[in-house]
Every structure is written in C-alpha cells, then in structure tokens.
Image (cartoon, rainbow, N blue to C red):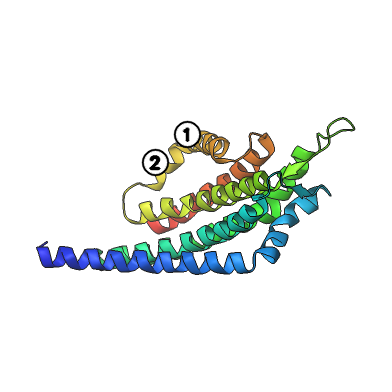
C-alpha cells in the first residue's frame, strides 16, 4: 500500500467516524429535547414490577437524569450505525464471498443488537425488578434512586444488546473458514460455561434472575448459530 492509498483509507475512516458521531449527537439532542416521554418510557419496566417510584437526592440530579436518558438513547442508536459503517469501511478490501458474509454479519448484528435491547426492556428488566423488589417487607421498603435505576437499565440494555450479537459472529467465522461446526459442537460444554460466566460478569446486578435471563437466550442463540453454521458449512 502506497502513501496515497494510506491517506485515502484514513480519510474514509474519518468519514465513517464522523457519520457515527453525527448520528450520536443527533440522537443525544433529540433524547434531551424529548427527555420527559423518554424517561416515562424507560420507567415502564419498573411500573410493571412495582408501584414504587423514583427519587433524587441532589438539586442537580434531575438534570443529570435527563442527560443520562438522552445519552443512553444516543449510545444505543449509534452502536448499530457504527456496525454498518465498520462493514462499509472494510468491504472494499474483501473477496466476493467475504463481502456476502460481511453484509449478513453487519445487518444481522445490528438487528440482533436491537432485539437484545427489546428483550431486556420487555422481559429481563420487568422480571428481574419484580424478583429483586419481591424481597421488600414491612421493615424493608424500596426508596429507589433515579440515577441508580437508569444506570441499572442502561447496563442491562448494553449487556443484552452486545451479547445477542455474538452468534452472528460465530456464523460469520464458520462462513469464512476460521472455525468449523464440528469444533463448535465439541466445545458446547465450554460454550455453556463461558455464557454463564459472561452473563454473571456483564449483568449490571448480582441477582441470579437477571443472569439466568441473559444466559438462557444466549444458549438458544448459540444452538441456532450452530445449526446455521452447519448449513453454511455444507
């Protein structure tokens, strides 16, 4: 690669990063403008689990909650865009069959990332909150901090979104010949152990309910990726 090509690649990389950053900033501004309905939407998993509301303890904390909710929306919006931009940056240097695999991987990764967030919002968060808040009693009443709740929810979204992507990477690795389905099948026990360990590490709360809710769909996705890998391999 000569110097001119190197500079051209750097310019393209800069353009891809600018596009991702622009999407992030637009989502951040939109999230701050519409923070009230966004916060109301993010509150629904808690309302489904318990009538307990949220409180803040410092004068500036309500403002920070608006910023935090907007930042959560911006990050979760920018990640799928970054995946697509990364693929478009790498595509010109790939062979034809690698490009087809790359299109599948980038599109499926963005879709599964969004699916992971929706699963966390509609299933994992309400169920996990109901489990955790179920330990309250007459002597133990919940007084939930808004900042802690949104940090918990954002961590849950990120964990489910990112880990839902990993089966697509497995299929892509098989398609490119990096690993075979036979090796994956023989490594099933190790994969199960790794899934539960990763779920325990990435789940933003130490309760087993949230960890199991993250691990079970990952196990199903791993088995699904193994089935697809065998079809691609053939």
Q: Residue at image x 76%, y 40%?
A: 131
Which residue in the protein does label 1 denote? 190
Q: Say which element carries label 1.
A: helix
Residue 207 placed where, x, y %? 67, 35
Please identify the quadrant where the C terminus is shown.
bottom left
Picture quadrant of residue 93: bottom left
The furthest residue to the top:
139
The furthest residue to the left:
2
Reply above or below: 186 against 151.
Answer: above
Picture quadrant of residue 132: top right
The reply to whether residue 110 is visible in this rendering is: yes
Picture quadrant of residue 202: top right
Q: Say which element carries label 2.
A: helix
Label 2 to label 1: alpha-carbon separation: 11 Å
| Mark drawn on residue 204 | none
Q: Which of 96 and 194 is in front in this view?
A: 194
Residue 193 placed where, x, y %? 52, 33
The furthest residue to the front:
59
Q: Nearer the viewer, residue 76 or 55?
A: 55
Reply above or below: 225 against 206.
Answer: below
The residue carrying pointer 2 sits among few (fewer than 14), some (14 to 19) or many (20 or more) residues within 10 Å by Cα, namely few
Residue 54 placed where, x, y %? 75, 48
Q: In this view, does 74 lie to the left or right of 34?
A: left
Which residue in the protein does label 2 denote? 183
Q: Residue at image x 55%, y 47%?
A: 159
Reply above or below: 136 against 53.
Answer: above
Residue 150 placed where, x, y %? 64, 50
Image depth: mark 2 or mark 1 in front = 1
Q: Is residue 206 left or right of residue 226?
A: right
Reply above or below: 60 against 198.
Answer: below
Q: Residue at image x 56%, y 60%?
A: 114
Q: Residue at image x 70%, y 56%?
A: 122
């Amino acid at each position: 690669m000569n110097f001119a090509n190197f500079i051209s690649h750097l310019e393209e990389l800069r353009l891809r990063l600018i596009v991702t950053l622009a999407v992030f900033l637009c989502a951040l501004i939109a999230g701050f403008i519409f923070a009230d309905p966004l916060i109301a939407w993010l509150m629904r998993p808690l309302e489904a689990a318990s009538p307990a509301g949220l409180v803040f303890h410092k004068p500036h904390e309500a403002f920070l909650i608006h910023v935090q909710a907007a930042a959560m929306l911006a990050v979760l919006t920018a990640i799928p865009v970054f995946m697509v931009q990364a693929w478009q940056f790498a595509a010109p240097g790939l062979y034809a069959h690698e490009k087809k695999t790359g299109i599948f991987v980038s599109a499926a990764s963005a879709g599964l990332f969004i699916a992971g967030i929706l699963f966390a919002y509609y299933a994992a968060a309400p169920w996990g909150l109901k489990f955790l808040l179920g330990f309250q009693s007459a002597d133990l009443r919940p007084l939930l901090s808004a900042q802690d709740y949104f940090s918990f929810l954002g961590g849950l979204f990120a964990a489910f979104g990112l880990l839902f992507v990993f089966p697509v990477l497995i299929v892509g690795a098989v398609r490119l010949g990096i690993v075979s389905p036979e090796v994956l099948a023989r490594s099933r026990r190790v994969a199960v152990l790794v899934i539960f360990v990763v779920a325990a590490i990435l789940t933003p709360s130490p309760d087993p309910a949230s960890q199991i809710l993250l691990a079970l769909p990952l196990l199903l996705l791993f088995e699904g990726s193994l089935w697809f890998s065998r079809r691609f391999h053939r």
